[in-house]
Image (cartoon, helix red, strand yellow):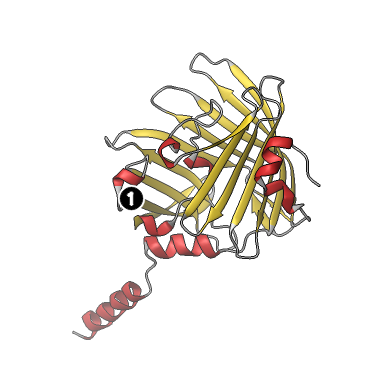
Amino acid sequence: MKKLLVIGLLLSTSLIYSVTGLDVMEMMETKKSPDSTHMLVELIITEANGSEKSRVVEMWGNSDSNELSNQIMVFRAPASVKDTRFLIKENESGDDKWIFMPALGKVRRIAASDGDSAFMGTEFTYDDMSGGDIDDDNHKLLKEESLDGYECYVVESIPKDLSDSQYGRRVQWIIKDSDILIPIKVELYNKDGELNKVLTIRDLEKIDGFWIPGSTKMANLLNDRSSVIINKKVEVNKRINPALFEKRFLTTGRVK
């Protein structure tokens, strides 16, 4: 009886201190991140037949005084997309997104209904380009397992309101190390339950105290296309002119 009592106490203690899926998501959300980032990346789009298109993109990101994030992307090459600019501004109720297409000569706001549309011909959608609110989903810790040499939490996230999400289910492999806490694999299921896309992150590198992905790949299993973002240059916590995140910059491409 004493042995059973000890085992019972051990089991109850492990349950009390067990990590939940929501715990993991909250740890990831509150992990310290850079105040600003500046990146030069190559974006490679691979068609189902194996042909490739390359894009060069410069990206800046920061957090404002209210700890809300801003991100601007400027396409530098090739000529067909040069000077296309894409702005994301976080607010209390979500994200606002605008895009400037030189061929049209005007700024277009990305409506919430367009969130599942492809971003610049890639396998990333507009909503994929910005983070969601963890409170929009129910999260469940499925298991813990090793992946690519990292011990990971495997967390399933299901939208509370399917009409507000392009995906019916997400499963993420999140590195357990509290210094990293980055998802290195994400399975994205459509609302019919099919595995639609898989996002993978590779070549993590610690830069000035922060872990930065070397490459991010989105593979579409339904159309055999993929898009890969490869970091060529990364700077963190450097001063960034806040005028970059104003709508005026989208049109002019210039800061005061």
Q: Residue shown at 38%/60% (left/top)?
A: 21
Q: Is residue 137 above or below residue 30?
A: above
Q: Is residue 152 above or below residue 26?
A: above
Snapshot quadrant of residue 254: top right
Query: Dot 1 surroundings within 10 Å: few (below 14), some, or many (20 or more)?
Result: some
Q: Is residue 225 above or below residue 180?
A: above
Q: Is residue 223 above or below residue 246?
A: above
Residue 224: x %, y % from top left: 45, 22
In which quadrant is the N terminus drawn? bottom left
Q: Residue shown at 57%/63% (left/top)?
A: 31
For the residue pair 28 and 253, the one nearer the viewer reads as: 253
Q: Residue furthest bottom?
A: 2
Residue 44: x %, y % from top left: 61, 26
Q: Residue shown at 66%/39% (left/top)?
A: 73
Horizontally, residue 13 falls left or right of residue 213, namely left
- Residue 141 is at least partly visible in this image: no
For the residue pair 99 and 192, the one nearer the viewer reads as: 99
Horizontally, residue 101 falls left or right of residue 111, namely right
Residue 153: x %, y % from top left: 43, 56
Horizontally, residue 152 falls left or right of residue 252, namely left
Amino acid at circle 1: Pro
From the image, tell me which residue sits under label 1. Answer: 159
Helix, strand or loop at label 1? It is strand
Q: Residue shown at 45%/43% (left/top)?
A: 186
Residue 82: x %, y % from top left: 70, 26
Q: Residue furthest left?
A: 1
- Residue 195 is at least partly visible in this image: yes
Snapshot quadrant of residue 34: bottom right
